[in-house]
Amino acid sequence: MWRGETIDRRGFLKAAGISFTAALFPRSLMALERADAVYASGFRAPDGSFGIATVSERGEIIDRVALPARAHGMAYSAATGHAVAFARRPGTFAMIFDPSKQTEPIVITSPEGRHFYGHGHFSPDGRLLYASENDFDGNRGMIGIYDARDRFRRVGEFDAHGIGTHDMTVSDDGRLLVIANGGIETHPDFGRTKLNLDRMEPSLVLMDAKTGSLMQRHDLPASLRQLSTRHLDIAENGRVWFAGQWEGARNALPPLAGWFEKGEDLSFASLPEETTVRLGNYVGAIAVNRREGLVGLTSPVGGAAVILDAKIGAVLREETVREAAGVAPAAHGVAVSSYNGQFNQTRSKVAWDQHIVRLG
Amino acid sequence: MRKLCTAGLILMLPMAALAQGTDTAPSVDLPPAAVTKVMTAAVDGFIRPGYDAFQASAETMTAKMKTLCEAPSKANYEAAKSAFREAAVSWAHIEIVRVGPIIEQNRFERILFYPDRKGTGLKQVQAALSKADETVTDPVALGTRSVAMQGFGALEYVLSGTGSEELLKAKDSFRCRYGAAVAGNIVNVAKEIADIWDAPDGIQKTWEQPGPDNTAFRNGGEAITVLLGILVHGAEAIRDQRIETFYKGADKAKFPKQALFWRSENTWASIMGNLEGLSALLDKSGMAELLPEKDRPVVAATQAKLKSMIALSGKITPDLEKAVGDAGERKKLDTLLADGKDVISKLNDGYGGAIGLSSGFSFADGD
């Protein structure tokens, strides 16, 4: 997720260097030169292969990196220039790459008894990479820790204090890990089957990034135990915004997004009924535009994108976007992609995956 | 709908990419009447008869087990094993439905606890047999114990595992009574699930009539997507869970004793049951009718591939040690894996794409 720490397009170009821009096709170079922002997102190509593309703010593909299989969430460190794409659960690889292609990609694999859960985040200095993982035989979420200075060697892990760990992020000062435990049990023996929909345990956790000790855990109330809290981002003031996917009755109207701060209880955005219906009780991605105080939500189920006021959670804008996939902060508003190849103003012959990361 | 189109609130998609109006825009948008027809056919023509047949086969299996216990003989032993096979195949047929009440309250695991890479079920069954724990000889009491010792895996060990010859030695042996209790427990779960689906105002109505007030499907697209999901996930389970568990390719490690029902040599009977279940659901639901004429050949092509896989499964030796050890048999296994991948692709991208999931079913299942 974009955290205000990113470099702009000029910074990205400078970091990328002459060799990167020289290697681009003229059309891609033009797209990069006129871009206000640069993003990356996973995609599936028409031939069924998977990759990561860097994308201009207009949605034009600048460059591509091939992946061995489908990716899900991504993270970027402005401090080091590293980007990472995590395998979609229950995948076992993560690819760390340099969007400017100055260095060769590094592929890491989850250790025995673990698989990646699809998300992760860098520490502010870029030295550590945290990854959400599943200890599938222990049925508990974990946070794997990888050392960026040692080719991303795995150096430890923390208990995520919940099950079905999905998205996670790091506070701006690097002291806190913020974890979304979706509460759904899965096991690679059963693919992506959700094994405990009748007894889910969603929770949101703040953890000490140094020790892994639990600082704050919010279990969802009994009436919302089927709201899988899966994605989150941090706003300017340290407020954690989260979004969920409802696994309960389809005619229910649960709150789909909310926020909390250190030492505070959960608050839920009071979305109008029509907005909840449009989102199909399902938010697939969330992103905060800190500069403008906005929260973007997307739903492939309902085919919608919604912008909220980050201070009060009120709906500011909502649009129908068929097969809406990722969302990320833009120079103004939010960038949105879709499974059918739309990325902002551009339609490409790819299926964009569920998440976008802003690089610059 | 709220729209504050100030410069700072820009959604970066152009208006051309945004659908008009304030309604939801589900990826799959199909005529409600056509959806109801297909969902009704799926429920009344496949799911309910499937669970009813499974219950009946489990009752027969229980009766044969009781007969074996009361009058141990070679003939009654063979009859019990035959009934086990028929019940396992009947289960395989409807097992492909991995949504709804079957995955609640551990019902699925109580019928079949698999995969079991750590041999949890085997250890618990062996412990129960060695201790002659009488509490496991009552089906109701057994239903409260570990799911790993309640279902088909446990009964297979009783009938075909080490020490199964005891079944022929004495009347009402502990082993036999435990086996009968397992069969009775399977009947109990089968009856429970069949009753849930047979209740006129219950899940069958929910599945057949999607709508805004429906607890399962807010619209027809959601219903058909779930129906397609049964087929996609069912095909994936056959390939990834039932075959690749013991055979991933000629140059890969092989684990024939990890296969489901290897002891009783019912592995292929079960897999054929799964494949026949997929074929029957695709056929009886009339899902092809939801597609534009030009896209309907994908259903016929899927059926042809399923029939081919069923035929080939019947030609592979049930002795899995031999199946993975013989070059000719391995070739058949390789073909099954390739065909399985093809079926998944046809359903996922072919059918899924034709109903509006532009990137296919699996790609669109979020996360």
Image: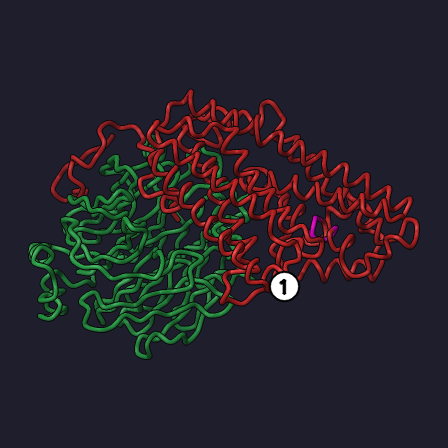
Chain colours: A green, B red
Badge 1 sits on which subunit?
B
Q: Give the answer, above or below, for where B98 lies relative to B174.
A: above
Q: Quadrant of the N terminus of chain A?
A: bottom left
Residues A27 and A309: in front is A27
Binning the other alpha carbons within 10 Å of mark 1 as few (below 14), some (14 to 19) or many (20 upward) gives few
The spot of residue B31 in percent (x, y) is: 37, 23
Tell me the chief SS of the magenta region.
helix
Specify start and end residues of the magenta stretch as a single range: B151-155
Name the image quarter holding residue A125: bottom left
The spot of residue A107 in percent (x, y) is: 34, 69
B21 to the left or right of B141: left
Residues A134 and B308: in front is B308
Residue A236 in view (yes/no): no
Q: Give the answer, above or below, for where B234 lies relative to B23.
A: below
The spot of residue A95 in percent (x, y) is: 32, 66
Q: SS class of the residue under badge 1?
A: loop
A16 to the left or right of B169: left
**Residue that label 1 marks:** B118
Q: Amino acid at mark 1?
A: Lys
Residue B326 in view (yes/no): yes
Name the image quarter holding residue A262: bottom left
Q: Is residue A294 magenta?
A: no
Name the image quarter holding residue B20: top left
The spot of residue B350 in percent (x, y) is: 37, 39
Q: Residue furthest bottom?
A: A150
B357 to the left or right of B255: left
Q: Residue placed at 7% from the left, 58% from the top?
A: A26
Residues B276 and B37: in front is B276
Q: Residue placed at 41% from the left, 51% from the top?
A: A265
Q: Quadrant of the C terminus of chain A?
A: bottom left
Q: Residue placed at 56% from the left, 29% from the top?
A: B203
Q: Residue furthest front?
A: B328
